[in-house]
Image: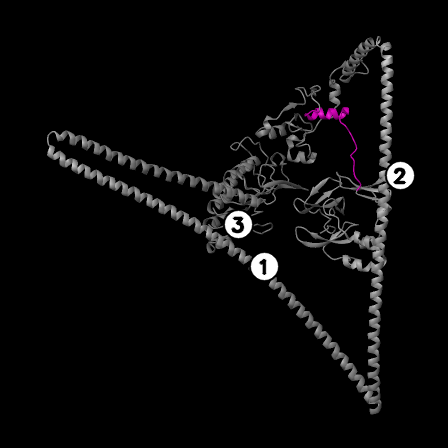
Amino acid sequence: MGILSLSNGCHDLLHVDLSRTDFQYKLTDMALLPLSERCKLLQHVNVAGCDYLTDAGLSWLAAGCSALAHLNVAHCVKLTDFSLRAIADGCIWLEFLDISGCPRISDVGLRYISTACRELHTLRLRSTILISDGMSLGRDNAQGLAALSHGCQRLQHLDLTKCLPLKPLRAAWKYGDLHEHHKARGIVPKHRAADMMFLDDYGTCWKAAIKIQVARRDAARRREEALIHWASSKMQSVFRGRQARKYAAVQRMLRRQQHDAATRIQAAYRAHVARTLTERLRKQREKERYVAMVIRVQSAWRRKQARDIFNSKRMLKLAIEARREASATVIQRAFRAYGWRKRNLLYSTALKVKKAEEEAAANKLQLLYKSRAARLEAQRKREALRLLQRKKDQAAQCLQRVIRRRRDKRLRQRQLDEEAKLNAAAQRIQRRFRRRQDMLSYQLMKLGREFQVRTEAALRLQAAWRRKQGPTRFQPWPNTLVGAGHMAKHMLRVLKDEQYQRRHQDTGEIRQRMPQDLLDLLPKPRCNDCGNLGDDMTTTLHPARADVEAAMTECGDCGEFFCSECWHAIHAGGRRRRHRFRTLYDYYGKRIDYGDGEFPSVWPSEIAQDELDGWYLRTSPFREPVLVLGDWEKYVDDSTHREWYFSRSTKVSTYLPPPAFKATAQDIALAWVRKQDGPNQIPYYFNEKTGQRTFDRPPTFVEKEDADAALEVKGVEQVAAGVERAQPTPTDASSYGVDMGNGWMQYWDDTYQVYFYYNTYTQESTYTPPDGAMDSIAL
């Protein structure tokens, strides 16, 4: 009765929320019938958790409310694919659909939705066990999520938690990306997906407008051609009629000469009139065309002038707004200064009043206990003492100014002298070093020339000796040369045979290819597409594929292994159907040896065998130390982004910071520097020792100018060290992360200008802050 009364009184109802969990009365299909008959403008309906709703009630709602844009039927366990068919027939403008927890909905219902609901941008399929990825065999034969990818191109949010993996369809939606985080899985919108969708729609509208314009221009051109054809036909018909009349006049001239003369005069006159009329019409058309061109040029010129005037007005408006902002800034600054002066004046006035009250009270007490003469004498002495104290204060201030000025001059002169000494010492060291380098270069050049002279002399002596010994050794040389060539060919043939031979140690059997028993001992490759999932997830999502562990086919273009189902799902259509492939096992399940092919190979099985045989070159990567303190060097691992330390003296490597890299509390307190956040243009504070970031000013932070003034009396070296410590490094927010505990590190992404998080234990990266680390995140 409540829903019936609501539908009778509110015909313009737009939003209805009937979601329930523990209500006393159950909602049935009859509750949706009055809404579908009387509330035709309904746009948002939420009936999540209504267990008694069936396909009939949802069919009534979809047939009556054609303007429905948001529908939530989550956990309505009695709904089937017929409900989705009714929604597709009646609600073509649907944008949001939630069918999570509906176990009877399958790929057939998704096919209905994909064929009708083109404006759908959010679809939730959480815990729908009958939904599969399907096989993409074309737009007309696609099933499951493949049909959804062909029909709903505007889909941006797709929730497939506790459903099958989406790796074969990770590139099916243009405006979404595959996102997996913990147990959540689905499609999320790409960066600036709304802008890309707007650009595509704008391009489609622009193409349609161009097509319409081309059609209109073709029609105008055809009309002009028809007019020209009609005019030429008219003139030709007039000319032919005149010729026919002349011929008839000549025939009639034999019979009636007088009548023929009159006819000729009339014909000549009519021809003159026709020519005059034709010339007049031609001039009139030329004049009209000239006027039209003049009007077109004038309209183009006026449009240009209007654009110039609009641009000038816009620039003038921007300049006025800039001047207005500058004036407002000046007025605000003056107003704040006036307020500050006014507050200071009130404070000084209050102090003066208080001081006057104290003096008045003192004078009153003195008047009670002293006589008039004593008061006058005391007043005179007080005046004298006040003048004397003022003179003393002025003299002390003068002496302090002189002393401070002289001390500052001495400190500045001492600083300049220290800098001059340092520069002079550096120049002397550089001159000595350069002289030594020049001397060493000269000595090396001299030794090189001597070595070259000795080498040339030795070569001349060897050449002379060989010329002398040549005739005596010429006779046995051909025999030696022939024997050496034969031995080299024999050794090459032996090495080549031994390289590809395999010998059985027990039986002595020798084979050129790898024996079948040795092939069976090789590790069985797993499918690179479904083998990445765990056994529990594979059993839950694919009960038929729970026993599939080894791959059956390898692709030479993809460089990956595939099982039978993944191979047909990925390489059945599109560009991948032309990839080179070969099977790994024969009909009896025995491993196939294809022999030694090209090197380096493109087949994953041959690459794995070459890796086991040791054909690949292995070299340790060369790394530059990030920081060097004494014998210890600091490095950063590129794969795990962890810091480790190496001692050059003891050759010891460790992940624990040595004592040379451990910062004291004073160093940590003085390591705060201020930086600028690029995307938000907000200053923040960074600790160069601990890597901590915060927007709140630390208590131990000192500005650069304050640090220079505080360290001026400590010498040039301490000031230089303080300035160097305050300089920020550009790699604080990009190359080095902040440790947040449990293996999580925070890094800055320069491409998207956001923070991301990396786990050094699980090798997992995400843009979402991890659980349990919110308190330690560096802002």
Q: Which colour scheme is used?
A: one colour
Q: Position of residue 419 (x, y in %)?
A: 83, 54
Q: Can residue 51 be seen in this view?
A: no
Q: Mark 2 points at which residue?
A: 650
* 259 sits to left or right of 380: left
Quadrant housing residue 580: top right
Q: Name the residue under label 1.
A: 322
Q: Position of residue 80 (x, y in %)?
A: 54, 39
Disc 3 marks which amino acid?
A: His
Q: Between 19 and 256, which is closer to the camera in this rendering?
A: 256
The secondary element bearing badge 3 is classed as strand
User: What residue sits 33% from the left and 43% below the top?
Assistant: 286
Q: Nearer the N terminus, badge 1 or badge 3?
A: 3
> Which label sits in the foreground, 1 or 2?
1
* 58 sits to left or right of 529: left
Disc 2 marks which amino acid?
A: Thr
Q: Where is residue 150 in the image (x, y as percent from the top left)?
A: 54, 36
Q: Mark 3 points at which residue?
A: 44
Disc 1 marks which amino acid?
A: Ala
* 479 sits to left or right of 231: right
Verify whether residue 624 appears in magenta: yes
The secondary element bearing badge 2 is classed as loop
Label the magenta part by its dominant secondary structure: loop
Check contact, mark 1 vs mark 3: CB within 8 A: no
> Which label sits in the foreground, 2 or 3?
2
Q: Nearer the N terminus, badge 2 or badge 3?
A: 3
Range drawn in magenta: 600-625
